[in-house]
Image (cartoon, grey):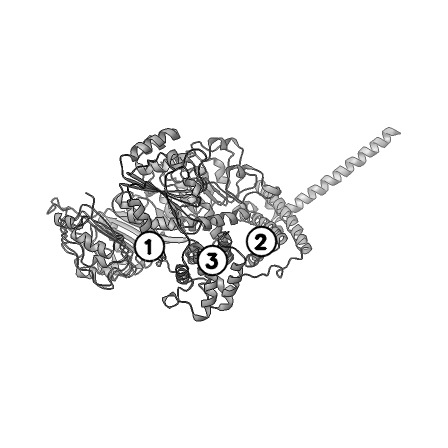
Amino acid sequence: MASVIGEAIAAKVCETAVDMAVQQLSKQIGLVINFQEDFEWLKDELKFMKGFLKDADQQCVQKETVKQWLHHVRDVALLAEDIFELCTVQPLYSSRHLFVLTGNRLVFRYKMARKISKVKDRINFLIGKGRQLKISHDVLSGEGASDSTFQRADWKRSSIVPVDSHPVGIEAKVEDIVSLLEKPEVSVICVVGMGGVGKTYLLQHVYSVVKNSFEKSIWLSISQSFSIPKLQHDLAWHLGLRKEIVDGDVTEQLAAQLINAHLKENKCLIVLDDVWKPIMEGNLIEKLGLTIDNNCKIVITTRNREVCRNVEAEIYQLECLCEDDSWNLFCIYGFPKCKENRPPEHLVDVARNIVKECGNLPLAIKATAASLASTTLKREWEPKFRQLQKVSTLNNPMEVLKLSYDCLPPHLRACFAYFSFFPGNENIECEYLVNLWMGEGFIPEGDEQWDVGWNYLYEIANLCLVEIWEEPEKKIFGFGHELKKYCRVHDLFLDLAVYVSKENKCAFDVEEAFQEFPNGGDGWCRILLPKKSIGKDIFKRKSFNPASPRTLSLYQNYIGTDFPANFFLNMRVLRVLDLSNNDITILPHCIGEMKLLKVINLSRTKIREMPRCIRKLSRLRFLDISWCPINELPVWISKLKSLQHINVFMTSDVNMITRVKGIAKLPFLRTLRSGLLQLSMENEELLKLEDVGGMIQLQELAIRVDTELQFKSIQRGILGQLVKMQNLTMVNHTFQISQNGTDGGPDLPLSFPLFPEVLKTMADLEKLQLENFSLTSCLFSFVNLRDLRLLRCHWSTYPQFENMLNLVSLQLEYNGSCTELPKGFGNSGGFPKLRFLLIRDFPRLVEFPELENGAMPHLEIFQLQLCLRVNKLPEGLERLKMLKEINYQLSGTLELRERLKEGGQDWNKIKACNPRVLITHRN
């Protein structure tokens, strides 16, 4: 009887198990069958969540429970976006008919369907939770900035303001520091002041005044986290001790001895900027190996007096601005469109109250003023004053800066937070930053995406949250320079960006990145570990936090070990990967599974071959392999259909790109950054001139014209479709050179071909470098030209450069026939924006025209090189108030050099009008 009952029970259990298995199987099959419907639901839900979060970001949410709920909504939105984008790049889901699906298609659908199901459950849970909290759009209302605060400023790409354009209340302080540096008994100066008071800004001015008075001038940014070996390596690069210290892999003690011995032989200025805290044993100066004597001057900026406790230093306490300077600074940034930056009468009282609440702190004044500059309505200024009254500037200036961040429109908040991608005190190349934003999806897709990204950057700069400047970057090979745009955030704003990023699940610590995410969350969204001195033991770990990050930065960690095969295994939704400045030699093949990857930076690594796995990355937009020992660009590069930027500059073969014809098949390629391209006209297997002519999206190109056939093709308009070109370098090698130069000058060409007028179609051209051309008037059709470099170029009639209204940099090099620059060079009103002027290798040049009042009003640097016959500099040069440097390297007659020596007639004349001008001559 018992056995019968047991068999019945067993049968019932089996029946139940079968039913459960059938139900479960039916459920799983249902997931696959309903996938397309669920996918469309996810698409609609994602659109709704993004809109909802955008509305929430525009408000000032006060309730902590609502903030936590919104954090969970953001987590789900990110997860939903990852699933949606994985589906859009994966063709395995595309068939609508179940019976057509086989193998991989079924597996992919099933996996994605399960993920969508989990997202559904979480969204339903959050909806219920939101009802409990009674959350609606009304709950999100608060006292925030009005819509008018979010109006976009009218920025133009050609109107970047230098960082020192408004030096208020700084002149006397610069003189104080310079005077201390001139005292023989003072070796170390410690500039102490609170965050945001302007320590770095002050030292930048001091540095520009005195740097050329020393044989070596070195600026080291220290910030919160630093390592002695890393700083010693930086010093070694500046001092020419790379082989002994960096490549030699020496101990800290030996590196300090080598640095100390080298510094004793040179007159040096060393700035240690932003030292946060004293090291536990000894002092920073001794640890680095710096000398303390009359030969070496050391300047430290810090918020903490204890930093200099073990050093015999002259302490300079930097105080906040006085009331008058505070008011003047506020007016400059708060009323840029008003006459003489004076406020309208109805805003004077509230503006003065706001200045008072800023506590005379320059950074707080600039940020607060800039956030109000777009409106003159009193009803929009008064809420800002009430907000400022709630925080104490001197006790916590971060609260004031946070108010400026809160005023940002939603599309700029993520962009601002992304400055945390870079280490502290880093000069950030603007172009790379915009590429990162595009890779992260911060900028809407479209033909104008690049310009929109730049506008975002200018909007943030307009609010004084970031400084943008342009400077001439010395060319690595050859002479001259190229204008580069950089930006930088103040350390307090960087702290704010890091704070905001941490709220949005960014990991900035090595150990933190490997730990389970707190409170059982979805994991880190971004892992940012630049310059963290990551050790080799990191590779003993299996991987980072199980959830996939969108960004991984291991920039400049000197990693000398290759990644294990499973290191990136959990990073399927990665968008940005920066491994630059490391000693890795290969990449794991699993990189090819990161279907959403848009940015890969491998510059200055030791990778010798382009990883084949990269060919799978159909969304890749930015690829940097510059300064790598890669000897060949692969044929499969043409498979990367979304690629917009390729940087292969200074790989082992700078012309390797011409051997890959497939490069012309990249429909969206915008920047082709390499050495000069030597293009073929006949070989069908090589990249030809006509191939380049069909790359209509190109905005940057450097080519070498080697044959008459190539030049005639250009004259006929083969490059005429490149109407979006912004940066063009063209070197002509189609002429004969005479064997004998005259008067010791360079060999003279028998004839120069005319610059092709058909290139006038490149109306947006901003940078132009030409070599070995005869110039025509068509040069002046490039009205947006900002950077012009002419090497061995001939002109039969004088080109009126002074009428090029947007020209910022002009470099004229190698002209063996010019004896005198035309008078137009000195015309009043000429060169209205010119900041950098270089005249090089004019062996017959004797003199310059006089500069009339109003000529070259913004000129900062005047360089004269290899012009031995020049007997006088331009009359009126002393009147240029913006002039910072005059350099006459290997130039000028003996009489001129005597007059320009310290104490000479011309020296005294120039210094009397502009005492801060540096006048240097190097043989």
* Label 1: element kind: helix
* Distance CA(mark 3)–CA(mark 1): 22 Å
Residue 865 percent coordinates (x, y): 20, 48
Of residues 887 and 721, the one nearer the viewer is 887
Residue 390 percent coordinates (x, y): 54, 58
* Above or below 8: residue 409: below
Which quadrant of the view contains residue 48? bottom right
- Hey, what amino acid is under mark 3? Cys
Of residues 456 and 834, the one nearer the viewer is 834
Sequence-wise first label, 2 or 1: 2
* Label 2: element kind: helix
Q: Does residue 2 appear left or right of residue 364 in this picture?
A: right
Q: Residues within 10 Å of mark 1 (few under 14, many from 20)?
A: few
Sequence-wise first label, 3 or 2: 2
* Mark carried by residue 46: 2
Q: Which residue is mark 1?
A: 171
Of residues 669 and 368, the one nearer the viewer is 368
* Mark carried by residue 820: none
Q: Quadrant of the image for the C terminus?
A: top left
Which quadrant of the view contains residue 678? top left
Residue 705 percent coordinates (x, y): 25, 48
Can residue 842 be seen at all in this image of the molecule?
yes
Sequence-wise first label, 3 or 1: 1
Q: Which residue is mark 3?
A: 358
Outermost residue to the bottom: 345
Q: Does residue 601 appear left or right of residue 483 in this picture?
A: right
